[in-house]
Image: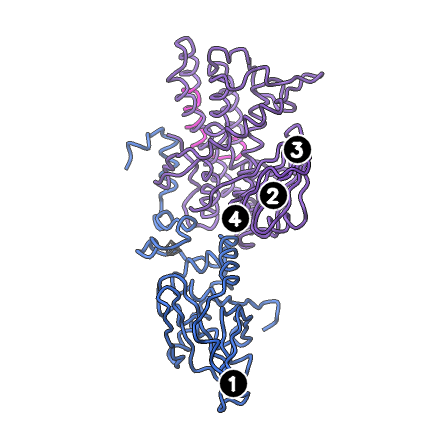
Chain colours: A blue, B purple
Amino acid sequence: MTSASETWVALSALQHLLFCERQAALIHVEQLWREDVRTATGRLLHERVDLPGHDARPGRRVERAVRLGCERLRLVGRADLVEYHPDATSPTGWRPYPVEVKRAKRKSLEADSVQLCAQALCLEEMHGVAVPEGALFHVAQHRRQVVMLDARLRARTEEAVARMHELLARGHVPVVARAPKCESCSLEPLCMPHVTAGQRRASDHLRRMVELVDPETVS
Amino acid sequence: MTTALNTLFITVEGTRLNKEGERVVVTVKDEKKAEVPLRHLRSVVCLTRAWMTPELLESCVEAGIHVSFFGVTGRFLARVEGLPGGNVLLRREQYRAADDGGRTLAIARAMVVGKVSNARQFVLHAKRDAAAEQVPSLEDAARRLAEHLRAVGRAEELEQVRGLEGIAARDYFEAFPGLLKGGARRFGFDGRNRRPPRDPLNALLSFGYALLAQDCAGALAGVGLDPAVGFLHEDRPGRLSLALDLMEELRAPVVDRLVFSLVNRGQLKPEDFKEEAAGAVMLRDEARKAFLVAYQAAKQVEVQHVFLGQQTSWGLVPHLQALLLARTLRGELDGYPPFAVR
Ligand code: SF4
């Protein structure tokens, strides 16, 4: 693979992808709403979240907004928070422990776990140590949920990365049917799912204009 | 859509804009005049000589806020934009479509259908409260526009579409004097002239179209399209052809309607204009301000988007149409659906 043909998948894209492939493509292929996405990300990165009790444990280090990358999967991005736990069984003497901070109510456990797992895959490659476990921290409930990064989750994560690579490489924005989740989708105004799903609508609309059909009389 | 379509207009000569924290600070002669949070802004329009710090410009570019500069006569000078938004693949598709006669014809035809249809609706609306003696000429104009509309729908050649567009525009502007009421008749109007505008009505139209063109260009760039490569308007250096294309369907319902409501209600009077030695007419500063305020207010007005089947505001219409055009180019729609005024 030459560097010119390389595409990189953003860590954040995986969550989008698991929520909706079209959303992931609109944001990462079409780069719509880039300013909103970026300002939102910026806000999140600047806002510190206190994780009670965590800084207190002896020898434990907490790093925020950690830049991550995985050459093997061509995956790049940032982790909100990575803890480094002392661990005698690790060749380096400590073990990275990603913590994904969730501010909103949980949308999908799978999406969050995949995101976390992707961070772990980056950390494993960067530090050369195994990362068997991480956690989701739910700000609203003030709750920490441990996630085991098992083989199934790793496979699911790599599959998501591969699919995102495919969408990026083809520059493809899939058309998907309108679904209940569209209601909660921040991209809905740009996606217009009710329009793209229906097929001959635009030419009907034009014909009505030409034939001077009052749109109010047509359903 | 959560975006408040806020535009910061700079009309006082010598205004300085700088950035403090996440806010734009507007200063005139060392006196702080206003503070606007960056995230509330969509564009900054400088209508007179203004200074902007590089820090602010950088933040605007980063946040996708378009900055445009106009000369004191209202002539568009430049817009500052960062790396184009959106997707290079979409722009390539736009260029391919622009090079493809069939696709160009289909899009240009749809745009002219939008333009003529909305012009006709505008005339019909105006007819409702026109003086009795004006009604026949307005009816006549509406009938001719309907004929042109049908002809556009059947047109099989791009040149034919462009020709019909020109004829329809002429018929439409011929009906203009009939739209003036009472005191506003003093304005006079003898067809459309623009370079330079030679009567107050033309000066207002030119100014309004310049503003609308910038809004359209911003909307197109915002979805990743190249505002300079058009379908109805041929490419020409220095011209935002696609912005002009997109503007066609919105001229009458946005700008013309605003212009007529301002002059018919007496909010702008012939005294608000000055004539230069050679006959060019321009708005006096106060009138420019009044027009800008009214233009911004008009963007907040709610309107039904027939194709999308939802309420929106006039200000968002260019953005929605730009999105629909992008969808058309990507093949997600079977044609470009122009904005339709009821
Ligand atoms: S509106 Fe629906 S289809 Fe569109 S991106 Fe969102 S979830 Fe996906």
Q: Which residues are magenta?
A: B142-160
Disc 1 is placed on an element classified as strand
Q: Which residue is mark 3?
A: B48
Residue at 47 percent across and 17 percent down: it is: B264
Q: Residues within 10 Å of mark 2 (few under 14, many from 20)?
A: some
Marked residue chain, label 2: B
Residue B261 magenta-highlighted: no
Left-right relation of B334 to B266 = left
Nearer-the-camera pick, B276 or B330: B276
Q: Which residue is mark 2?
A: B25
Q: Which residue is mark 1?
A: A94
Residue at 40 percent across and 39 percent down: it is: B312
Q: Which residue is mark 4?
A: B39
Q: Are marks 1 and 3 in contact (CB under 8 Å)?
A: no
The vertical placement of A125 against B168, above or below, is below
Residue B150 magenta-highlighted: yes
